[in-house]
Amino acid sequence: MTSSSPSSARAAEPTKPSSPPPFPWVGLIALAAGTFLSVTGEMIPTGLLPEMSTSLGVTESQVGLLVSVFAFTVVLSSTALIHLTRRVPRHALLVAVIVVLGVSTGLGALAPNYELLVATRVLGGLAHGVFWAVVGAYAGHLVPKEQLARAVSVTIAGGTLAFVLGVPLSTALGHALGWRLAFGVLAAAMLLGAVVVWWKLPPVGREESHAAASGATGRDPSIVPVAIVCIAVGVIMAGHYAFYTYIAPFLIGEVGVPAGQLSILLLVYGVAGAIGLILTGSVFARRATTGLFVALTVSAAMVSVLALSAGWLPGALVAFFLWGTAFGMLPPLMQTRLLHAASPRIRDTANAFYTTAFNTGIGGGSALGALLLAEIGLGVLPWVYVCLAVVATSLLAADVLRTRKRESV
């Protein structure tokens, strides 16, 4: 009779399942802070169109085009800049681009004329594109796949909070003390935010390390679903920003909202978006596809009601709130869909293309809105939103059906 050795006895013992790593709340909240500042910087002109127009001696359409300039800079530069910075540690890169955002916003506050303000928006757009290409993948590197939706919801919460607090507070500050002071305060907050991100955000690896670890070569099979998500997000963002960029004159001129109450309504819209984010992380956390189609359908329906309710303030305000709730669900659900679709080895690149598509939609939408505002008027803008929402929904529905058909074979 042979006795088993201690080592063999240990080998025979059942292996305890490894517990999931603790959720990186601190790091994700730091990412959310960066997202809050970046989105506020991008959208700050939307609430200050009348003040900036008067101060700079240009039309409201030209001020609205500042959003287009910012977004098109992202479109033209983000993929190339991500390639050029692929060997730069992601942590250091995020800190650097937030600093550049702060500098560009501060220079915008000092710009003596419209042309120089446009130049500062170009500088900010360069940094913004890199920021968004990195931040989307960063959350995916911090957590395992089963925690992606939760991590993305926390990160995207910064963008939602920008609509809840950032844009409304900037609007109120600009109305009270001037748009330049609003830009200056935001610039100081961005520089402080860079310190917070440097201090609290843990470092992660880069895309190349994931590719090497997997030993993968050749064409990645997740390219097609990633491309469909990118196209769909570009279409829905085009519709949204064709309308939302000019929401201030629409609410004042078409709905009849007093100008002094505009910042309150923007705050309400942001609160509604926060409710949508909560719904995403709770009700639709395990049903992301269903949530995505619910959000698209409700947002299109409520914008239709808003357009038809122009002149009837109570109905328009209810539709405005529900639109904000539905749209608040879209960014985290689209980002989650992208991260699920993309393999780990192409997440950074996929997010660069996603950022390009996202900002192509923003820039194209705000430019389209400016053209339609000048040529036709405010009344057509919500219907552009509805039409493009239908197109985006159709693209995603076709992709879902294609995926299910392939999985059933």
Image (spheres, rainbow, N blue to C red):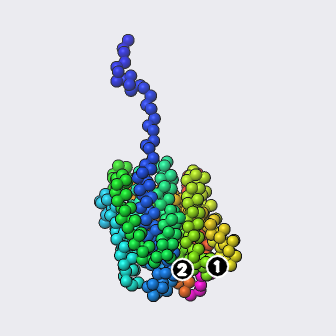
Q: Is residue 13 left or right of residue 366?
A: left
Name the amino acid, label 1. Gly
Q: Is residue 77 left or right of residue 303?
A: left
The percent position of residue 369, horizontal first and vertical second, equals 54, 80
* Front residue of this view, candidates 407 and 19: 19
Q: Is residue 192 visible?
A: yes
Q: Residue at x 51, y 81 (%)?
A: 50
Q: Is residue 7 left or right of residue 225?
A: left
Q: Which residue is mark 2?
A: 369
User: Quarter holding the N terminus?
Assistant: top left
* Front residue of this view, candidates 146 and 376: 376
User: Could you say which disc has been placed on residue 378 in the image?
Assistant: none
Q: Quadrant of residue 131?
A: bottom left
Residue 54 higher or lower than 134, as above or below: below
The percent position of residue 237, horizontal first and vertical second, equals 52, 70
Comes first in the chain, label 1 or label 2: 1
Q: Main secondary structure of the magenta part?
A: helix
| Magenta-tinted stretch | 375-380
Q: Which residue is mark 1?
A: 256
Q: Residue at x 70, y 76 (%)?
A: 312
Residue 187 within the magenta-colored segment of the rendering: no
- Give the CA separation, mark 1 to mark 2: 20 Å
Q: Is residue 175 left or right of residue 284?
A: left
Residue 15 higher or lower than 3, as above or below: below
Name the amino acid, label 2. Gly
Crowding around mark 2 (Cα neighbors within 10 Å: few <14, some 14 to 19, many 20+) is many
Crowding around mark 1 (Cα neighbors within 10 Å: few <14, some 14 to 19, many 20+) is some
Residue 205 higher or lower than 224, as above or below: above
Q: Residue furthest left?
A: 87
The percent position of residue 226, horizontal first and vertical second, equals 47, 61
